[in-house]
Image: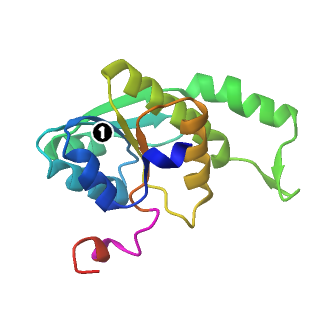
Amino acid sequence: MWTKKCVREFDHIEAVARNGGRVVTLFSGGLDSFYLLWRLSRHPDLEVYALSVGLGGDAEYTDGAAGAARLGARHVLADHATVFADEFVAPAIAAQASYLGMHPVSSSLSRPLLARAAVELAGEIGARVVLHTANRSQNSLRRLNTSIAALGFDGYFGSPYELERSAATTNGPR
């Protein structure tokens, strides 16, 4: 079962990081992504790859790439705009996919592709950890974790924000 290797809080990263190795983290360039990179940077034996997946929107990753580098991570930008349009958006439009019968399906379509890009990069570089920053109040948490598991990733994966109450609790006594 995939929960045996699930990362659900920052303490889990501490345990996994002791062995060193390579880590892939989905990187949006937001505060949660930078905080995760900062936490990972405290482990000099980890080789961190910050993966930004371009899906064809307006996102700019150049500023984030520089910040990731300052934290010792290698930024990887994977352009999957065509794959997203052809394999995810077009079938959803053809199926008239909607959420609760009234909202167009949008960001939920991207989560399996983000997971696939992360698992593919992990395979290419030999990473045994794949992380993201979704929390338990977001549907993305389940979509990303389920997709990573369904893709057969055999390493540790998940979000250290799943069980964390706030970033402040990770630095102080519990």
Q: Residue furthest bottom?
A: 173
169 to 2, vertically: above or below: below
Quarter occupied by residue 141: bottom right
In the image, 21 versus 84, the foreground residue is 21
Reply yes or no: does residue 126 show up in magenta: no
Q: Residue furthest top?
A: 124
Q: Position of residue 27 (x, y in %)?
A: 38, 44
Q: Position of residue 36 (x, y in %)?
A: 30, 54
Residue at 82% x, 49% y is: 98
* Residue type at numbered disc 1: Thr
Tell me which secondary structure the magenta stretch mostly adopts: loop
Q: Is residue 55 left or right of residue 35?
A: right
In the image, 123 versus 62, the foreground residue is 123
Callout 1: SS? helix
Q: Which residues are magenta?
A: 162-168
Residue at 57% x, 67% y is: 137
What residue is pinned by disc 1? 62
Q: Position of residue 25 (x, y in %)?
A: 36, 42
Q: Position of residue 116 (x, y in %)?
A: 53, 30
Quarter occupied by residue 146: top right
Q: Is residue 15 left or right of residue 93?
A: left
Q: Report if residue 55 is visible in the image.
A: no
Q: Is residue 5 left or right of residue 62?
A: right
167 to 65, vertically: above or below: below
Quarter containing the C terminus: bottom left
Residue at 49% x, 42% y is: 58
124 to 11, vertically: above or below: above
